[in-house]
Amino acid sequence: MATRREKIIAKAIEILKSNPDSIRYSVLVRKISQEFPEIPVNTIRGTVWNLETRVPNEVYKPARGLFRHVEFKEEEISEEEQKPPLEIEKIKEEDFYEPFADWLVNELEECTKAIALGGSRFRDKWGTPDVIGKREPRRSDIVKAPTEIVSAEIKADTRDLITAFGQACSYKLFSHKSYIVIPKNSSQDDISKLDALCLIFGIGLVLFDNSNPNDPQFEIRVRPLRHEPDMFYVNKYMKLIERELWG
């Protein structure tokens, strides 16, 4: 008769075989617990947390906190080969600029004013933020904070997320805070890696529904860290959009 641990491992492998896109640790524990309610959840957790070590010929971790069956390992493809759904291609990335600018001001309250930008307004190879905003002290504020510049790089396509992260990093040259905004349907591996990179570099990470510009459901995953940009570049670039952002 199988032991509890053997039953848990067998069920975990069965679940992973039916989920080629990998499963998070917490989800896997919940699914096993639903199958075996008589087994204490702590026993399940204690068996699952290092599943890739217990059965390395069956399970591996494609990213932190994710489990995947080894038979799907060969199906991993590079970002260049990934194809976005056809219906997503019909939606322009620019359609999300204004909604995100509005979200920064009215929901996150990170800015007192934010505008859609994009294109090549900054006229150099370092790129132009898709959305840029400012946070200024209000008259009602007792303690007046200094003005902050907030920039964001938005990607509606799940490809080229590495490039997008590099752009968000470059915006720190003239911004006190910088965000990268990516689709919720990005691969779990990409989201996990960007999550870690954003924590390391102090970049904000936001997920959104790239199929619905009318209700993108922006969700903050990592909050950005404030830092002091180079004031020479702050003034250089803000002069190019002075009328829109300060007018």
Image: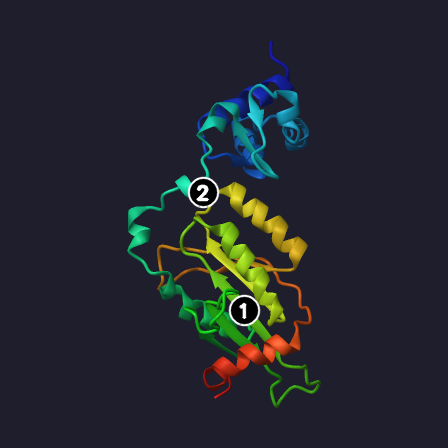
Image quadrant in which you'd find residue 213: bottom left
Task: Choose mark 1 or mark 2, whichever is in front.
Answer: 2
Residue 195, above or below 3: below
Residue 98 picture location, percent across and down: 41, 71
Q: Circle 1 sits in a helix, a strand or a loop, which is it?
A: strand
For the image, the number of numbered tags is 2
Instruction: Say whether residue 136 is left or right of residue 185.
Output: right
Gap in angstroms between the C-alphas marked 1 and 2? 25 Å
Residue 184 picture location, percent across and down: 46, 51
Would you name the residue on which mark 2 appears? 79
Q: Circle 2 sits in a helix, a strand or a loop, which is it?
A: helix
Residue ranking furthest to the right: 143
Image quadrant in which you'd find residue 231: bottom right
Residue 201, above or below 19: below
Would you name the residue on which mark 1 appears? 151
Residue 77 picture location, percent across and down: 45, 35
Q: Amino acid at mark 1?
A: Ser
